Amino acid sequence: MAKLQFLNKFVELHLIEQSKFAEKQPADDTEKESTSESADESDQQAKQRGKTGEPGPEAETEDSAVGQDDFVKIKAKIQFVNSDSIGLVCGPESASLVKGINFEQHLVFVDVYEGPDIIAGFSSIVTKHWVDPLKGISTLYINYPKNIHSRLFPAAERHKIKIPASLHIVSRSGQILAREIRQRAIPIVIRDISETGAQILSELRLSDLFHVSLNFKLQKQDFEVLAEIVWAQTADKYYLYGLRFLNIDLTAARAIRNLSLGITEKLIEG
């Protein structure tokens, strides 16, 4: 992927302290080796614990695997790219997530989006974290990656359509919302759809921190798909949102895949 193709792309960052990541990784085989003397000593200690009922080390420690709670998830946009680094401007909705935190020297995993689809991904190190003193917006500078994984989520065939639909807001920033909010149907129009996501128009202003349940009808079948809002734009008096599907089933994927030009035209006219 050419460097300039990164410009102005929306990205999702997953940041974690290097020390925390290193501490929670499995130990090397070399660290697991021990002398026969220490092994014998361990055996004797294990037998002694068996007699006294004392719990072993495995009962005293928790799972050391890195979990999602260890990461800070931020939406951003690539502002500039050069031969050595990439500059990422964090979105205003991420202000509360970055406030009071210096991400310099953090390890970062980056997903690059094209509409609702992830087109590339890489990992890097944050070399500088600058905060605009007037606007409070953070800019992260990272090393240009040595390796870039392209097309992690291949762009599926997209269909330009215009069908009425509805969505329910399920959660915000990972927190499940109250029942009365989740049950409220929001009328929207789907204008673009694929097996991996969709573009929708709505009169309601939403944040890209929302997870939503999208309800629509294709070929006389009703479908419901859980989705994440990955980008947002203003279009006249409406708001345009890009959704990434999180749990689309085979039946819905097949219905979208089989959308022919004739069916699409009927949907638009209807």
Image (tube, rainbow, N blue to C red):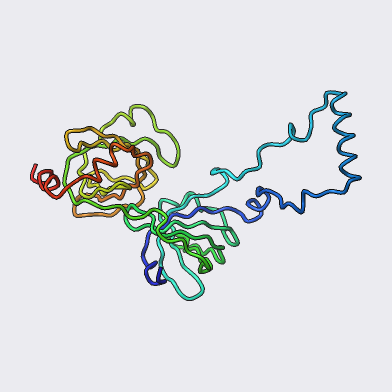
Q: Is residue 255 left or right of residue 71?
A: left
Q: Nearer the viewer, residue 132 or 156?
A: 156
Answer left or right for 5 relative to 49: left
Residue furthest to the bottom in view is 83
66 is higher (above) or lower (below) than 144: above
Residue lying at 26% horizontally and 53% vertically, measured from the top left: 157
Tell me which residue sits at (35%, 38%) in the image.
226
Q: Is residue 88 above or below residue 217?
A: below
Q: Which quadrant holds the C terminus?
A: top left
In the displayed structure, does residue 51 sit left or right of residue 142? right
Q: Residue at x 37, y 62 (%)?
A: 9
Q: Position of residue 130 (x, y in %)?
A: 51, 64
Residue that lies at the very extreme toward the left in this rendered image: 269
At which x and y percent is residue 95? 46, 52
Number of numbered markers: 0
Give the percent coordinates (x, y) of residue 110: 47, 57
Q: Position of residue 239 (x, y in %)?
A: 25, 50
Residue 254 in which image quadrant: top left
Q: Quadrant of the N terminus?
A: bottom left
